[in-house]
């Protein structure tokens, strides 16, 4: 996996906040990247997002060293990668929820999460809340996730147009979060990956401050230098006011990474067709 | 901080109405929340729908219609200081949460409590998590003021040699790319405190005023001379 993906991650507290409540983690060996934007009083937001990323990496990475991400789980019929991603978000939810129940200063804390697990020329994307995943393919930047936010629901139901949403005062009200209740419903989807694709995971501190068109021009122009692109994205958010913490993870697909299959598996796959 | 409407006639204050309900009606008949007893006003003239901190004005098929800031409209997303006119009456919309809240609270992400029960079936559409309890919302999220874009200095580069000599490229975007992504790229970025040149990729590093650049961004000054792969350009500020 390390050969197929180039990964760069950066986080910044922004120009207004003293604390950085975002957390990021990457594991190039298993192709996992996780970003979380915590919320809650004092430093509970940092605690929540920190728990989320560490629990998720611990849940996903070790099992993938043992067995293949495309092995189907007997109970659910899903591939191991999807099962692990789903399970890891539930585990993160349990850990944060328990901590918030037992520690008074952590009461009510929660976090958004967006995670991408690359395997077998695909990416499994799991998210809860309003942290996003974008994909740059060719010159086109596309938003892959759909925010779990009040604003998105208003856009979906036609109450408000995308143009009007820019002026809405109901920003940053998420309708789902990890750790605020006993259970959580993550949204998980699989997407085909092409060589040359660039994936951008970000907290709302980026997309609230920088227009999608500007994100596109930065990532497109700087695709040859991901570290500089990450720096430029954060700088653009801060130049525009930097009212929130801003985190970005960029993943570039350098080459194909199909999962090796045995002869028997290939035969079975062929027969299924 | 609840938004409000201030009713007046020819500049004379009549009454103030808090938009505390989800649905506020405006009309001539007495059952409306805001009653304007005037024949130019329809019995049910308009309604204001308020969702947390946002309010939407809607014309309820009134006979004489209404205007917002002088423009005739049927549906309008109200912004602070909007002036609604119905007949000779004015309603000023005020939503001044911005000034009332602590700057440190800006942009805090909040959770809308939507209880997720273990037994609840998975939501069938994104975001469909059940009922919101707006009462559980903490303090409500403050609003970012529609930040006026900072006055931007204009600048351009002019090619000094080659077949396109004399050609000018104005730096209108936040980021202007020179070269081809994947091969050789230099970008010019516009920031609040000036313009910068950065080498992104490729074997050729640009030089500025004869000084070869390294990987770091460099601020450009008026009439700086840029040279990239044999092409000479002048950077200058436009007044």
Image (tube, grey):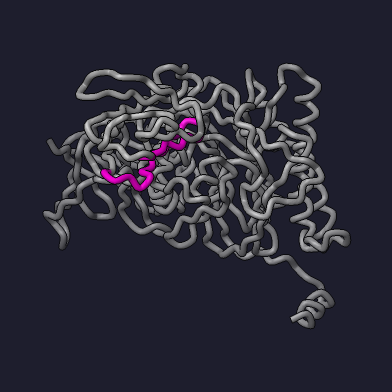
Indicate the quadrant where residue A80 lies.
bottom right
Magenta stretch: give its range. B44-64
Spot occupied by residue B210 in the image (x, y as percentages of width and height)? 23, 41
Indicate the quadrant where residue A111 lies.
top right
In this rendering, position of residue A102 left or right of residue A153:
right
Please indicate, yes or no, whether residue B81 appears anywhere in the rendered image.
no
Indicate the quadrant where residue A53 lies.
top right
In this rendering, position of residue A207 left or right of residue B160:
right
Figure check: B3 above or below A179: above
Spot occupied by residue B27 in the image (x, y as percentages of width and height)? 36, 35
Figure check: B91 above or below A141: above
In this rendering, position of residue A273 left or right of residue B200:
right
Q: Which quadrant: the C terminus of chain A? A: bottom right
| Nearer to the camera, A116 or B95 | B95
In this rendering, position of residue B165 left or right of residue B194:
left
Q: Which quadrant: the N terminus of chain A? A: bottom right
| Nearer to the camera, A69 or B29 | B29
Figure check: B189 above or below B1: below
The residue at the point 55 percent across, 38 percent down is A203
| Nearer to the camera, B213 or B71 | B71
Is residue A60 found inside the magenta-colored segment of the image? no
Is residue B54 found inside the magenta-colored segment of the image? yes
Total marks drawn? 0
| Nearer to the camera, B183 or A30 | A30
The residue at the point 75 percent across, 38 percent down is A92
Please indicate, yes or no, whether residue B76 appears anywhere in the rendered image.
yes
């Amino acid at each position: 996996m390390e050969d197929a993906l180039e990964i760069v991650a950066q986080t910044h507290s922004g120009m207004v906040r003293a604390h950085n409540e975002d957390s990021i983690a990457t594991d190039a060996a298993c192709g996992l990247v996780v970003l979380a934007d915590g919320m809650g009083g004092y430093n509970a937001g940092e605690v929540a997002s920190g728990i989320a990323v560490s629990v998720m990496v611990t849940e996903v990475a070790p099992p993938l060293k043992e067995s293949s991400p495309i092995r189907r789980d007997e109970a659910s019929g899903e591939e191991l990668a999807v099962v692990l991603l789903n399970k890891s978000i539930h585990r993160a939810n349990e850990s944060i929820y328990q901590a918030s129940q037992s520690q008074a200063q952590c009461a009510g804390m929660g976090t958004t999460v967006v995670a991408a697990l690359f395997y077998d020329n695909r990416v499994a994307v799991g998210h809860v809340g309003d942290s996003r995943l974008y994909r740059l393919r060719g010159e086109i930047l596309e938003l892959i996730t759909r925010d779990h936010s009040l604003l998105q629901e208003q856009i979906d139901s036609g109450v408000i147009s995308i143009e009007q949403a820019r002026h809405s005062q109901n920003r940053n009200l998420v309708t789902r979060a990890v750790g605020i209740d006993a259970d959580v419903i993550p949204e998980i989807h699989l997407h085909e990956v092409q060589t040359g694709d660039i994936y951008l995971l970000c907290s709302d501190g980026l997309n609230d401050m920088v227009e999608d068109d500007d994100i596109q021009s930065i990532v497109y122009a700087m695709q040859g230098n991901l570290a500089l692109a990450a720096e430029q994205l954060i700088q653009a958010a801060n130049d525009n006011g930097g009212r929130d913490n801003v985190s970005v993870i960029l993943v570039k697909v350098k080459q194909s990474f199909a999962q090796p299959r045995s002869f028997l598996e290939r035969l079975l796959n062929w027969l299924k067709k | 901080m609840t938004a409000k409407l201030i009713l007046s006639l020819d500049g004379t204050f009549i009454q103030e109405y808090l938009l505390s309900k989800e649905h506020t009606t405006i009309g001539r008949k007495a059952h409306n929340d805001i009653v304007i007893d005037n024949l130019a006003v329809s019995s049910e003239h308009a309604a204001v729908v308020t969702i947390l901190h946002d309010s939407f004005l809607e014309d309820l098929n009134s006979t004489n219609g209404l205007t917002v800031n002088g423009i005739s409209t049927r549906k309008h997303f109200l912004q602070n200081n909007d002036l609604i006119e119905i007949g000779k009456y004015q309603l000023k919309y005020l939503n001044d949460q911005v000034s009332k809240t602590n700057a440190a609270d800006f942009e805090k992400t909040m959770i809308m409590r939507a209880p997720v029960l273990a037994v609840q079936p998975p939501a069938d559409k994104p975001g469909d998590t059940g009922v919101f309890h707006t009462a559980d919302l903490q303090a409500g999220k403050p609003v970012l003021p529609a930040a006026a874009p900072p006055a931007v200095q204009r600048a351009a580069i002019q090619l000094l040699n080659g077949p396109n000599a004399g050609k000018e490229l104005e730096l209108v975007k936040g980021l202007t790319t020179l070269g081809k992504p994947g091969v050789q790229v230099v970008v010019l970025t516009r920031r609040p405190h000036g313009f910068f040149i950065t080498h992104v990729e490729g074997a050729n590093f640009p030089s500025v005023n004869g000084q070869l650049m390294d990987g770091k961004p460099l601020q450009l000054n008026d009439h700086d001379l840029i040279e990239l792969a044999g092409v000479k350009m002048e950077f200058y500020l436009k007044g």
